[in-house]
Image (cartoon, grey):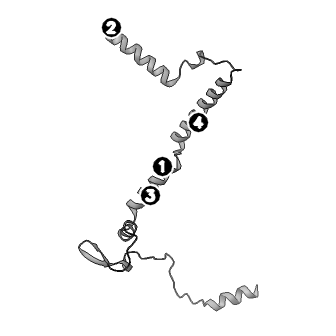
């Protein structure tokens, strides 16, 4: 029973210190310069904690590292091979027991489709010149 009381008292003390339930009882003097620095530091820490929890703000290096890992994980095989070995000039790369030329590793495509819809390029320039 005594162990339970000691554990409960300790748990309450740790919780009140963590959540700051009784900080209002330990007020610092308003004229002391160190209290201004400590108060502003505490407000900054609280603001940073809220921003990181709510909006997911992170330091730039952490974001950069996560973005690079995400890019490497989601990149096509040819691009990831090229990133791993940027000195690929000529030759071939073995992918799934097949030799693939370096030129065929990365293919740039366009989402725009070139279709002949009966409009010639010359007509566009004539219309823009007339207006």
Q: Which of the marked residues, 1 or 3, is nearer the chain's N terminus? A: 1
Residue 47: mark? 4
Q: Which of the marked residues, 2 or 1, is nearer the chain's N terminus? A: 2
Q: Nearer the viewer, residue 131 or 9?
A: 9
Question: In this rendering, is residue 16 above or below 115?
Answer: above
Which residue carries the number 2 mark? 2
Label 3 environment density (alpha carbons within 10 Å; few <14, some 14–19, many ≥20)? few
Which residue carries the number 1 mark? 62
Question: In this rendering, is residue 67 above or below 8?
Answer: below
User: Are the residues at dot 4 and dot 3 in contact (C-beta closer than 8 Å)?
Assistant: no
Q: Nearer the viewer, residue 39 or 21?
A: 39
Residue 105: percent from left, percent from top: 37, 75
Q: How many marks?
A: 4
Could you tell me which residue is drawn at 36 percent across and 77 percent down? 102
CA gap, disc 3 and disc 2? 54 Å
Residue 113: percent from left, percent from top: 50, 80
Label 1 environment density (alpha carbons within 10 Å; few <14, some 14–19, many ≥20)? few
Residue 94: percent from left, percent from top: 27, 73
Residue 68: mark? 3
CA gap, disc 4 and disc 1? 19 Å
User: Are the residues at dot 4 and dot 1 in contact (C-beta closer than 8 Å)?
Assistant: no
CA gap, disc 2 and disc 1? 47 Å
Residue 73: percent from left, percent from top: 38, 60
């Amino acid at each position: 029973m005594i162990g339970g009381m000691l554990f409960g008292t300790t748990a309450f003390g740790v919780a009140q210190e963590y959540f700051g339930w009784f900080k209002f009882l330990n007020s610092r003097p308003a004229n002391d310069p160190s209290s201004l620095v400590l108060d502003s530091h505490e407000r900054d820490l609280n603001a940073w904690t809220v921003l990181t929890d709510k909006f997911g703000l992170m330091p730039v290096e952490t974001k950069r590292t996560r973005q690079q890992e995400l890019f490497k994980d989601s990149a096509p095989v040819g691009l990831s091979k090229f990133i791993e070995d940027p000195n690929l000039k000529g030759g071939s790369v073995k992918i799934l027991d097949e030799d693939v030329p370096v030129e065929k590793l990365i293919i740039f495509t366009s989402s725009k489709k070139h279709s002949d819809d009966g409009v010639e390029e010359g007509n566009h320039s004539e219309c823009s010149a007339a207006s």
